[in-house]
Structure formats: C-alpha cells, structure tokens
Amino acid sequence: MIPNECSVIICGGGPCGLMLANELGSRGISTVLIDDSPSTTSNAQASATQARTMEHYRRLGFAKEIRSLGLPADYHTDVAYFTRFTGYELARFPLPASGESSKVTRKMLSGSWSAAELPHRISQMWVEKVLLDHALKYPSNSIHFNHELVSFSDGGDAITAQIQDVRSGERKPIRAQYLVGTDGLNSLVRRSLGIEYVGEATAERYFMGGRMLSIHLNSPQFYNVCPHDNAWMYVTINQDRRAYMIAVNGTGEFELNTQLQDHEDETKITKADALSMFQAAVGKPINAEILSFGAWETGRTLLAKRMHRGRAFLAGDSAHSFTPTGGMGYNTGIEDAVNLGWKLATVIRGRAPESLLSTYENERRPIAERNGNYARQFADALGNTPAPPELETDTEEGAATRKKIGDYYNRQARQEFDIPGVTFGYRYDDSPIICPDGTVPPPDVPNVYIPSACPGGRAPHFWLGPEGSLYDEFGPEWTLLRCGERPSEAIPLIRAAKAARLDLKILDLPFPELRYIYEADFALIRPDQIVAWRGNSCENVHGIITTITGGTATFLD
C-alpha cells in the first residue's frame, strides 16, 4: 500500500531511480518509488557498466552480485568490427572475461585504471533486478510498479502528488518533502516543471544517427555459423545493413541495433522483417527467435536547461539524453543518483541547510554536458565513416580498403572503450561546497586519468593488502583520512564536525605511499567519494565545515 506521506517520491524505476532508492534507503529516508511499467525491463538496453559505477555498487555491497550476472565467466568481452558477422573481420579490441577480473584486479588497476573495480558488461535488465532486490530490503522504501504520476504541485513547504494505479485507475494523493523525476526522455516531471531540453535532437550519420531498430532475439545457432572468435559487441560496416549487436547471455541471446534505411517504415516492420535484418547483418541465412523489437532515435545530445526547480529534481534521462556510444547515459544517471541521494538525506535529517540541494544542479549539469559531448565524439568517430563499395569484394582493392578501414576502427575502438579519463576524471571544481587549495587539477582527456586529490575530484584509490581497497575503509557518509605523521593536529576539525552533527569516520592510514598520492596529511572525503578538502593543518575548521555542508552550518556546544 502506498503511504500517505514520505520524504521523497521517485518517479521512474529504471537504473537511476532504483539507484536513488538504494542511496536513500541505505540512509533510512522514507521513499516512495513509482513506475508505470509492470516490473523492471525485460529488454537488454544499456549493456556497459563503467568502473566508477561498479565502485558505487561495491560501496553499497552488491558489486560481486552484479559481476556474477551477464555473460559466462570465461566469455571474452571483445569489441569486434566486420563487414558482416560471418564476413571479413576488420578490427578487434580485446577485453577480458568477467571471470578474469579478480585475477587481474591488482595488476590491471593501476595508473590510469587506478580503481577498486573493473568495468563489467551486463545488460540493463539484470542490473535493474539487482537494484530492485536491494532497494526492497530497506524498510523505509515503498516501491510500486504499475503506478504512474498523474500530476503534482509544489506548495513551497511540500510536494503534493496524485498517483494512479494503471490497472484499476484508482488515484491516491501523497505528500512528500521532495520529488525526483527519473522518468526518462519524455519526463512528465520535467514537462510539468516547464523545463526544456537544449542541444541536438538528432544528428545525421552513416550510422548511429537517425532512426534505429532494436531487435531482442535468441539465436544459439549464431555461434556455429560465425567463424570468428566470440565478442561482446559485434559491429558491421557495409553499405546496406549497418548494425551493432550485443551478446546478452553468451549462449544465443542478443540485442541487435540496426540503422533503418529511408524506405523502411518502422510502423510497418514485422517479425519477418526483423529476422531478415538480422540475417543481413550476419551475412547468411540463420534461424532466430525474435523476442521483441522497437524503433528508437539516436543522434541526440540533449540537456535539460535546469535539473532542479523548487522541491523537484531531474536525474538520469529526464535530465539528459545521449547517443549510447561510450555507455554515457546509464552511467551518468547512476552518478546523478549518488550525488543527489546523500544531499537529500543530509538535508532531510537536518544536518545541512536546503542550500546544499542547489549544488546538485551546480555539480551534475556540467558533467552531463561533458559526458554528452564525449558520447557525440564517439558516435561521430563510429558513424561518420562511409562503407566503400569495394569493402566486401574479394579483390586486391577490397583487401586494401579493409586494411585501411580496419586500422581506423582499431584506433576508434580504443578511443571509445578505453576511457578511464571519462570514467574517473569528472570534477566539481566550481562547486560552492568544495574547498579549493590553489592546486591545478589534471587535464580532462578521455583516454588518460591521472589520480589526484586536488579537491573537487574522485578520491585517489589505493590498495590495502591483496584485495582490500581504500574505498572499503571509507565511512558510509563522511571520512577524514589521516595519512600524515601528525594525526592529532586534526582534532579541532573532528570537534567542529561533531558539533555540526556531521557523520564522520576517522581513518588513520599513515602510509608514505598514500601520503604521496594525496599530497597532504589530511583529506575530507564526501559520501560520494569526492575530495571536499585537504590540507596539512586544520585551520578555520568552522569555515571548512560550513562550506562543505552548504554554507550555513550550525555548531552545537
């Protein structure tokens, strides 16, 4: 039963909404999540979980569960390019199998990949189920599918919303302190707030621009027909059926996305047509069960003008919509939820003023714009290259063309799929709740990440023993990391944090290597693992605490 009142209403039960329910639920915030679908998605949809997202899943305790799902543990997650799936192989970017992650973690995760987790290739339908299962474990969460938001009003001191059961039509009013729209591209919350998207609604490309058809299918025969090594992503480059296909379970389930041609009317496509499109991409007659299919539009780079108005917020696809290259949309939405979750909880608990909530838009909107631009760059690199007519011919000219195209896509794959700078390098330098120290952060480039404790960025990772991560030692909320030789000098800061009712864990790790990485004796780490302040002495402690909590901290005796 939906309660009459709660602290937060979440409208939308995709990854972003479910992640926000976990963030709030883990902090005991009463939350109602509604979604008009019968349950979580049954389609593959997003399929690339970035390492930073996996770090957040680790923080919440279910990274191993996520990593156990998806492709078989020994299935390599290469990205491979072909004329057709059974035709010529043009390029391949090798990536490890999920089962290898525990073996290579300490070896691989250093330098630009200095992290607690590797990326993982898993379809959204499994991610959502895990997120839902864990969100349901929190008593403060009330989650209701088959329910939709009809309307809401912001009375200044509260949100009043009308919720409708899509099966019975019964309506119920509910009162909440805040409302978060995670309800997708056509968000009712965004439209009701009068907030428009800005940016590109479409971009014309040879591929990944304009109308696409997504086909969810099952074809175990594919692995017998395809003469090439397995891949996680299969991409075709030819003149009549450009497509990319994601391996969902490694035994025959796939998600094929193909560019629709001018003469193909998405409203008239049948299962037989969808099968024919799959066969054209394969390059041979092949059996397949078409599970579902639907048209969608790619080429977008859209960003809401605002992500916050009054007591209502936008997150995930409600706030931004990107071309799926680079996996930016889903992962950006997860970060939205993480950022907003701890801030809502802190304000609702009375530990910070409402001004803290305005920093959500201040921090996340520039990152959404950044990530959308990266997605567009990757889409341009993938889709703006034409397929020459000789590409599929068994001639010297064809071989030379394939070599040239293959070299290009080998470079392009590394630019899109080896992106630690995108994954870890986002920063909140202009945020009013960051205490700058005058140092210059590393450059923001997609394929290189330079760990830095310069305030405003992700806390540098550090391994503690064979498997232990520094991140595992951070507190669930704030952490004061003391890695210098004079830990007692932080006592005034600790007292000020206690007086401000800041939930602070004191973490003493006097390792020279850690002190070298953080370049300071002390660092304050936010609940989202962002460095808020660092220093070698603790002066003006009230000013530090006031800044990081939103500007008007109250200190109790």
Image (cartoon, rainbow, N blue to C red):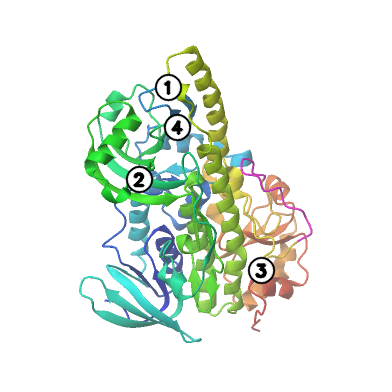
Crowding near pointer 3: few (<14 within 10 Å), some, many (20+)? many
Q: Residue at x 44, y 43 (%)?
A: 120
Q: Which residue is mark 3?
A: 433
Dot 2: element: strand
Horizontal relation, residue 362 to residue 443: left or right:
left
Task: Answer with mark 2 or mark 4, whichever residue precedes in sequence.
Answer: 4
The local crowd at label 4, few if under 14, some if 14 to 19, many if 20 or more residues have their Cα within 10 Å, is some
- Above or below, 253 against 311 in this view is above
Say if the magenta span includes residue 505.
no
Q: Earlier in the sequence, mark 3 or mark 1?
A: 1
Q: CA distance from mark 3 to mark 2?
A: 44 Å
Across and down, in percent, residue 109 comes to 56, 39
Residue picked out by circle 1: 392
Q: Is residue 235 left or right of residue 539?
A: left
Location of the N terminus (image quadrant): bottom left
Q: Answer yes or no: do the residues labelled 1 and 4 have beta carbons within 8 Å? A: no
Please provide the residue range marked out in magenta: 437-450
Q: Residue at x 48, y 53 (%)?
A: 329
Residue 21 point in image, percent of width and height: 41, 66
Q: Are marks 3 and 1 in contact (CB under 8 Å)?
A: no
The residue tagged with tag 3: helix, strand or loop?
loop
Question: What kind of residue is marked 1?
Answer: Glu
Q: Earlier in the sequence, mark 2 or mark 1?
A: 2
User: Residue beneath label 2, please?
Assistant: 213
Query: Would you say residue 300 is visible in this rendering?
Result: yes
- Give the Cα distance between marks 2 and 1: 24 Å
Amino acid beneath label 4 = Asp
Mark 4 = which residue? 78
